[in-house]
Amino acid sequence: MSRRILFCADVHLRPGDTEKNARFLRFLRMARSEASRLYLLGDIFDLWIGWKHLRLGDYADVIAALRDLTDSGVEVVFAPGNHDFLAGRAFRRATGATTMYYGGDVEVGGKRIHVSHGDYLYSMDKNSRRFITVTRGFFGRFVIQPLFKLLPTRAIFNLTGGFVGHSDRVKKHKKSESFEIDLREIRRIFARGVDVIVAAHIHRRQKRDFLLRGAPKTLYVLDAWRESGDYLEFSDGEFAQKRFD
């Protein structure tokens, strides 16, 4: 049997959550022995403040495990989410991972797969869209984020913590229909030859099948890690949604 390709997201690692951190480290060890490629589709860390987080050492064991994974020959692709959008050059150097800042299209088993955190795939109110633009759009990436490098560590924690708090409040207080799939965006992605979309962000596992001009298409949405870890596996030409305990 060929080695597997794995996808996971929304782990939301925190320094004090030893149980979840240990589970994720076990997951990385499993990936090292059984996978050829691992896609981490954002919000792996509940908060990541950039290169200064490497000095703090909050996730030293996870960073070391990712480096061990890439050194062993497993390809790791990281697509930042709205909680860890400051993962950049220093993160790549420390882990050996490849980063796809806005996600993108990849080839998996002869299929064209669009992978991303997916926060832009859902219908949201104008305030939430402004939030995404400021933190993760062109202005956020090339103006806001470079400014963070000039700030003291505590100031960065306060600012990014505010972004994270806003994101959590939006998810908690908005009606569920505010986070339904934006079908126009989904069809636009499928129309350029994509067969499968793998995304996350809304903390609800989903599998939805579409038919576009006679061609079958599939959307997979990854769940958040809670009592167990949600992940998607591609093996022997098939996708399977699984849990990791």
Image (spheres, helix red, strand yellow):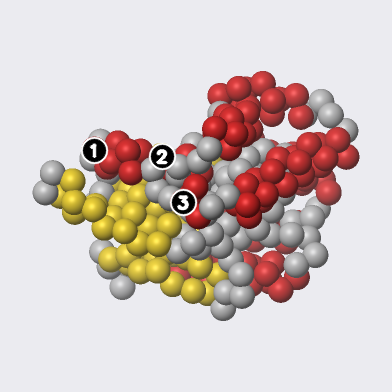
Identify the mark at residue 46; answer none if there is no mark. Answer: none
Q: Residue at x 56, y 78 (%)?
A: 245
Count of number-bearing discs: 3
Pick the front one: 215 or 72: 215
Amino acid type, callout 2: Gly
Quadrant location of residue 128? Answer: top right
Residue mark closest to the camera, 1 vs 2: 1
The quadrant the N terminus occupies is bottom left
Left or right of residue 7: residue 142: right
Amino acid type, callout 1: Ala
Residue 93 seen in this snapshot: no
Residue 235 seen in this snapshot: yes
Residue under label 3, please give it.
177
> Whole-percent x and y of residue 206?
40, 62
Q: Secondary structure at mark 2?
A: strand
Q: Secondary structure at mark 1?
A: helix
Pick the front one: 181 or 109: 181
- Residue 73 higher or lower than 161, as above or below: below
Q: Are marks 1 and 2 in contact (CB under 8 Å)?
A: no
Q: Are marks 2 and 3 in contact (CB under 8 Å)?
A: no
Residue under label 1, please give it.
191
Residue under label 2, please give it.
104
Q: Residues within 10 Å of mark 1 (few under 14, many from 20)?
A: few
Q: CA distance from mark 3 to mark 1?
A: 24 Å
Label located before the other in sequence (1 or 2): 2
- Residue 156 higher or lower than 224, as above or below: above
> Whole-percent x and y of residue 109?
27, 56
> Whole-percent x and y of residue 65?
64, 61
Q: Residues within 10 Å of mark 2 (few under 14, many from 20)?
A: few
Q: Secondary structure at mark 3?
A: helix
Q: Residue at x 25, y 36 (%)?
A: 192
